[in-house]
Every structure is written in C-alpha cells, then in structure tokens.
Amino acid sequence: MNAPKAELYAHDLSTAVWRKSAASAGENDCVEVTDLPGGGRAVRDSKNPDLPALRFTAAEWEAAKKGILAGEL
C-alpha cells in the first residue's frame, strides 16, 4: 500500500460524520460517504456500517464518481 493510501486507512473513522451518497439508487441500496484528509473519501454500506469502509484518495474518488455518472460502475 502506498503512503497516501496507508494514511487513509490509518485515519480513525469512529467519530466520522457519514452522509448518504447522492448516487445511492434507493432506500435499500444506500452508500454512505465521509470526508477524509487530503480530499479523500471513505465509503460504507449503510446496511452493514460495522464492516470496514473502503477508502479512496481524492484522485480515486473523482475517477469513481465519473465512472458512476457515466454508468460504467
């Protein structure tokens, strides 16, 4: 894991403020996101909030958003 990614996974999410993603399809398909240092984001399944969250650098997050909006993901 490269240094920026390792820093994201070292960040404590216990006090994170999660919000429902605007890209969530419906009430039962909710993805929640929270901001991380350096413009990164953490993403979790709202139905299983105790599972580990995925963490993205700012560049990864932008690429993922573009893919979602384009219907690629």
Image: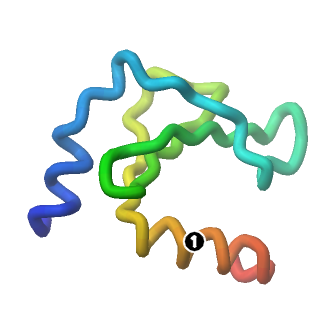
Give coordinates of residue 51: x percent, y percent.
Answer: 43, 30
Report the residue at 38% width, 44% height from top. 36
Quadrant placement of the N terminus: bottom left
Tell me which amino acid carries mark 1.
Ala
Colour scheme in use: rainbow
Q: Quadrant of the C terminus?
A: bottom right
Q: Pointer 1: residues within 10 angstroms few (<14), some, or many (20+)?
A: some
Query: Extreme right residue here?
Result: 26
Judging depth in this view, the residue of 47 and 38 nearest the camera is 38
Judging by the rendered image, the residue that carries numbered circle 1 is 64
Residue at the outermost front position: 38
Identify the element where label 1 is drawn.
Answer: helix
Residue 28 drawn at (x, y percent): 83, 33
The quarter of the picture where residue 65 lies is bottom right
30 w.r.t. 57: above or below: above
Q: Residue furthest top?
A: 15
Left/right placement of residue 38 relative to residue 6 reads right
Image point (57%, 41%), residue name? 33
In the depicted structure, whether residue 67 falls above or below residue 19:
below
- Locate residue 27, reporting x and y percent: 88, 32
Residue 41 on image: x %, y %: 45, 50
> Which residue is drawn at the image coordinates 78% and 41% (left, top)?
29
Instruction: Report the side of 16 relative to 32 (left or right).
Output: left
